[in-house]
């Protein structure tokens, strides 16, 4: 279709147009506050009709790829299908219109919902206590590390350093830093999992905790995690587990049984709540029994069928945000858990692992697999098989877009050169996987015979490859009328 | 199972291709000692109709629909135009991933750029990021930005800041060797000039002022910037009710350096407090590289056509890791789209009209309540909420609850010594008849 | 350019008596891509060989620059604030990052000269 790019809403603006509908004021208008407190003008907001608004945002929607359209093989993101029943339950008016400062007796449904979700997550992971307030995985990590620090402080010494493997997601060291810790990076073993011997080398009285992702970002199960937990505990240190990859473990492993002290989960990954283009998510944190006293406030308590928030907790780390977290996201996760049931979750894990291994098996003769260890729900390939053609991982990714497939995670984990991290999840059919495998093979051949095609990709998307250098050097973050 | 798109035959074929007999074999890398012997069980799975019944029952245990609500305090009832729901609920806005592959994410990126434009303009600033979790964490991030920029670790925070914002800031700064002192408020409910003068000095890295503040009072604080003078101290404005920007002077007119807050009023339901929409904006280009979170910027593609990308990315955790300006990764992206649509619908004229109605209704209520002899605690001008005093606030609150009225928030819930104060909020959704009913009930239960 | 010495992490020193200009090699800037931001160190800072001193950033990477030798930073190239691309265009000239007063001249012997470095990057 020959069509111009959709303009900015400000470029559709014309004075006098409007899209709003406001009832007449039913109270007498009077001069209530001094003129000097009022703003003289409201520049820079649109003036458009409802028709144009609908057309505009519909056009923008068309520019977006989404899970509803196709698959996202993004490693460690678990971009599974977002069930539509989640939207219905989360859209019930009684939830939408409940104010966080309502008297508790008027919002028992909400408080019960929070408690119900906590209990199911406890059952799934083995941790007796959960907090559902963290609004993202990183927020959960921060809350978790703050709780670990508080526990250590109560024992007399918060210590100074957190150990983090080189395959970890960037939020791990960042969250540790904001909890007041220095970070020491430790090497993963040659087979892709962390060795307890390595941990012992770095362990001393300054080590507050180790943060581990299990399975890790290579898709490899951390088989020495139990021994690592024991070693840490002997040293008076704690074990934090990043549960971003929990989709590989449901029904098989309860992390609390491994000796993990604190775990976060990602509801917008494992538990099917939609990504929304980057959020909102939720990062609930499960903790071992001894951490109950440091949980963020309020803690919802149930007594005789009544639910009440408890703020009177002297050793709590305090509030990590306002109100009760991303409550709307919690409703969707609970809906998913109730629909799947324990057996359904286990099946999800099994199909996720099968799908990932199917891709691994069928691409390993074309792409280079740097770690030969068995992987679970995701697999990582390196750039080594196509580097010699002068083609980079980013070029492979951009060419996939031409085929209507979203690329895998690229350049992460850092320990693999030009990494391509692939996680199909369980909600993809064999047919989709076959198309993906075929396309990846085709692109590899293109890399060999026609590298320029890849370097100039994508060719068929709404925009071609974008100049990120220009965006960073000359930051233009808002529309300005004069410049157009 | 409806979310597993594979038939038994497909599964068999895949197992064969992988070279295993059963799917359990694929878990052989997990040591048997790690496998749980404690089967997960939390009840039978529910069918769709059963799910709807379950949640309708839970919904039914919320009694809010039966009550007249005069609630605010950082979460506001405003009319959300139908198109906001209709458009934001499109699968292409609800289900995509973060726009790390911008070529197939121009919808999210352009809508976010439009939001950044609107929130920058409303706050009088030049630059905005693409959202933070909420107003409380945004306030904390604003303080941390000032800490990085000034290299000072002492701050002044207005005591009239939202108490949950203060609590959250405390949690965030606790382990970073940062401390703060409160600035008291005067009998107008505004930041006390005397107390500020006592406490301000060159060691202060930043000052946080909320307007309208938690008590609903509109601050007039140009004098703060004058007092700061040449000192390297950042003025940070906090806004919990962004609708006020429709009619009140933007923070830029007070010389503010950074604006933070919660834009929940722009298209988000109260939703028991979340998801809401944290924001941060600034005018100083030097602060750009210290901003937390994702930022969308304009650029061109290989054919010279305009496009949008996530930019200044090295600030973030996935690149700088422990050196990042924040640990934030996922933000409130979908809420940003709702805000952009909401602001497009109301636009220049509508937002002002909406804000005006809030201001007038609240002041009408204030006048009427004053007339029946109830004390209005503060003399300062208000936007859409204010504090009244009764003999026993919680008792008054309870009595009105019996009449199916939620008469605001007893301040004792936040300040244990405050037995008399109640924060009442009036927005455009409160009809005159409702307000009159509240006044009558208050009169009968003074 | 016989006063250029290189580290295995692709930093260089351009020695001038007891001071040296430090930066990243041409190979490093090519690998990194277009530099959009440099986080400069502070003058007066005392550094040891191998310390993380400063950072050079492309749109997608924040590369660490390690001290090639020990000493005290006596000057930083503040032109890089507005023109970070100098590192790409002239890494050994106008693209220098910081100047140090060398404290242990023997450390230079541990570095690679230009020929050895060229062999190193080919391997």
Image (spheres, rainbow, N blue to C red):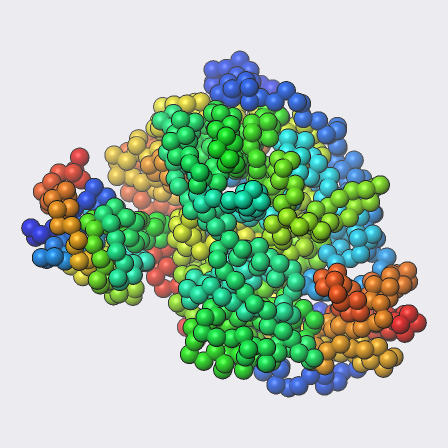
Q: In this view, does B136 lie to the left or right of A103?
A: left
Tell me the quarter of the picture where residue A25 sits. bottom right
Q: Which quadrant of the rendered structure holds the C terminus of chain B?
A: bottom right
> In this view of the protein, which residue sits in the foreground, A278 or A397?
A278
Tell me the quarter of the picture where residue C21 sits. bottom left
Q: In this view, does C62 lie to the left or right of B419?
A: left
The residue at 62%/35% (across/down) is A288
Q: Which quadrant of the rendered structure holds the N terminus of chain B?
A: top right
> In this view of the protein, which residue sits in the foreground, C12 or C71?
C71
**x then y, percent, for residue C68:** 20, 48
**x then y, percent, for residue A184:** 39, 41
Does residue B114 appear in the picture of this structure?
no
Q: In this view, does B273 lie to the left or right of B29?
A: right
Tell me the quarter of the picture where residue A35 sits. bottom right
The residue at 45%/80% (across/down) is B229
- Of all residues, the one furthest to the left in this rendering is C2
Identify whether A43 is placed above or below A338.
below
């Amino acid at each position: 279709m020959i069509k111009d790019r959709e303009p900015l809403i400000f470029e559709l603006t014309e004075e006098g147009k409007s899209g709003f509908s406001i009832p007449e004021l039913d109270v007498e208008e009077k001069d209530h506050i001094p003129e000097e407190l009022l703003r003289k003008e409201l520049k820079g907001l649109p003036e458009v009709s409802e028709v144009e608004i609908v057309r505009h945002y519909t056009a923008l929607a068309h520019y977006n790829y989404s899970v509803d359209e196709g698959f996202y093989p993004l490693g460690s993101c678990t971009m599974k299908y977002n069930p539509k029943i989640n939207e219905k339950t989360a859209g019930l008016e009684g939830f939408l219109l409940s104010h966080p400062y309502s008297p508790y007796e008027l919002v028992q449904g909400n408080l019960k919902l929070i408690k119900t979700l906590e209990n199911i997550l406890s059952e799934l992971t083995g941790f007796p206590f959960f907090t559902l307030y963290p609004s993202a995985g990183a927020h959960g990590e921060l809350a978790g590390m703050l709780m670990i620090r508080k526990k250590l402080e109560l024992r007399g010494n918060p210590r100074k350093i957190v150990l983090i493997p080189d395959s970890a997601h960037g939020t791990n060291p960042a969250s540790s830093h904001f909890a007041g810790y220095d970070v020491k990076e430790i090497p993963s073993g040659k087979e892709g999992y962390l060795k307890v011997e390595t941990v012992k080398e770095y362990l001393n009285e300054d080590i507050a905790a180790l943060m581990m992702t299990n399975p890790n970002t290579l898709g490899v199960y951390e088989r020495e995690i139990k021994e690592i937990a024991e070693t840490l505990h002997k040293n008076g240190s704690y074990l934090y587990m990043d549960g971003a990859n929990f989709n590989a473990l449901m029904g098989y492993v309860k992390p609390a049984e491994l000796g993990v002290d604190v775990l976060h989960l990602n509801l917008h990954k494992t538990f099917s709540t939609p990504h929304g283009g980057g959020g909102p998510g939720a990062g609930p944190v499960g903790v071992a029994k001894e951490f109950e006293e440091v949980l963020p406030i309020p803690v919802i308590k149930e007594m005789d069928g009544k639910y009440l928030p408890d703020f009177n907790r002297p050793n709590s780390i305090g509030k990590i945000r306002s109100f009760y977290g991303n409550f709307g996201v919690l409703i969707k996760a609970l809906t998913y858990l109730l629909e799947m049931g324990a057996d359904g979750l286990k099946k999800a894990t099994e199909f996720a692992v099968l799908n990932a291994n199917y891709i691994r098996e069928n691409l390993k003769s074309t792409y280079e697999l740097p770690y030969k260890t068995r992987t679970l729900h995701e697999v990582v390939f390196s750039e080594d098989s196509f580097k010699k053609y002068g083609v980079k991982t980013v070029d492979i990714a951009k060419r996939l877009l031409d085929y209507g497939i979203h690329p895998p995670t690229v350049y992460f984990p850092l320990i693999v050169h030009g990494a391509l991290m692939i996680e199909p999840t369980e909600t993809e059919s064999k047919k989709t996987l076959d198309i993906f495998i075929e396309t990846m093979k085709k692109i590899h051949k293109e890399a060999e015979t026609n590298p320029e095609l890849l370097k100039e990709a994508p060719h068929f998307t709404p925009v071609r490859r974008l100049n990120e250098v220009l965006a960073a050097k000359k930051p233009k973050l808002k529309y300005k009328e004069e410049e157009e | 199972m409806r979310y597993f798109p594979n038939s038994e035959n497909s599964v068999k074929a895949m197992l064969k291709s992988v070279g295993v007999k059963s799917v359990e074999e694929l878990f052989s890398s997990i040591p048997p000692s790690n496998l749980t012997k404690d089967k997960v069980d939390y009840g039978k799975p529910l069918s769709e109709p059963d799910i709807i019944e379950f949640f309708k029952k839970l919904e039914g245990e919320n009694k809010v629909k039966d009550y007249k609500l005069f609630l605010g305090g950082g979460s506001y009832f405003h009319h959300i135009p139908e198109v906001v729901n209709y458009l934001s609920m499109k699968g292409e806005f609800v289900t995509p991933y973060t726009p790390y592959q911008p070529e197939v994410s121009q919808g999210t990126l352009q809508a976010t750029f439009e939001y950044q434009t609107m929130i920058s303009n409303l706050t009088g600033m030049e630059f905005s990021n693409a959202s933070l979790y909420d107003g409380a964490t945004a306030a904390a991030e604003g303080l941390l930005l000032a800490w990085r920029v000034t290299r000072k670790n002492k701050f002044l925070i207005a005591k009239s800041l939202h108490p949950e914002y203060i609590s959250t800031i405390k949690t965030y700064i606790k382990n970073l060797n940062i401390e703060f002192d409160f600035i008291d408020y005067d009998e107008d409910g505004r930041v006390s000039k005397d107390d500020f003068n006592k406490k301000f000095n060159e060691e202060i890295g930043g000052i946080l002022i909320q307007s309208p503040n938690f008590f609903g009072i509109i601050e007039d604080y140009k004098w703060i910037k004058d007092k700061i003078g040449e000192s390297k101290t950042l003025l940070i404005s906090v806004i919990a009710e962004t609708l006020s920007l429709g009619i009140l002077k933007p923070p830029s007119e007070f010389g503010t350096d950074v604006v933070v807050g919660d834009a929940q009023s722009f298209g988000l339901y109260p939703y028991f407090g979340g998801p809401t929409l944290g924001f941060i904006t600034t005018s100083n280009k030097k602060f750009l590289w210290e901003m937390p979170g994702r930022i969308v910027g304009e650029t061109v593609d290989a054919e010279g056509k305009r496009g949008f990308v996530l930019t200044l990315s090295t600030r973030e955790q996935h690149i700088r890791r422990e050196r990042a300006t924040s640990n934030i990764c996922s933000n409130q992206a979908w809420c940003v789209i709702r805000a952009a649509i909401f602001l497009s619908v109301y636009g220049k004229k509508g937002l002002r009209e909406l804000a005006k109605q809030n201001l007038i209704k609240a002041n009408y209520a204030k006048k009427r309540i004053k007339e029946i002899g109830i004390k209005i605690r503060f003399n300062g001008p208000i936007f859409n909420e204010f504090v009244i005093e009764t003999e026993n606030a919680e008792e008054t609150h309870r009595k009105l609850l019996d009449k199916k009225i939620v008469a605001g928030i007893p301040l004792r819930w936040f300040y244990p010594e405050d037995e008399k104060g109640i924060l009442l909020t009036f927005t455009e959704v409160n009809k005159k008849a409702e307000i009159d009913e509240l006044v009558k009930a208050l009169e009968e239960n003074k | 350019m016989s006063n250029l010495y290189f580290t295995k992490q692709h930093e260089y020193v351009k020695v001038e008596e007891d001071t040296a200009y430090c930066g990243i090699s041409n190979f490093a800037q090519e690998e990194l891509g277009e530099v959009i931001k440099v986080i400069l160190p502070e003058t007066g800072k005392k550094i040891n060989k191998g310390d993380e001193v400063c950072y050079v950033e492309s749109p997608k990477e924040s590369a660490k620059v390690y001290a090639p030798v020990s000493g005290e930073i006596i000057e930083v190239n503040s032109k890089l604030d507005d023109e970070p691309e100098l590192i790409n265009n002239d890494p050994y000239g106008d693209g220098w990052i910081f100047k140090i007063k060398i404290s242990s001249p023997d450390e230079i012997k541990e570095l690679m000269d230009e020929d050895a470095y060229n062999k190193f990057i080919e391997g």
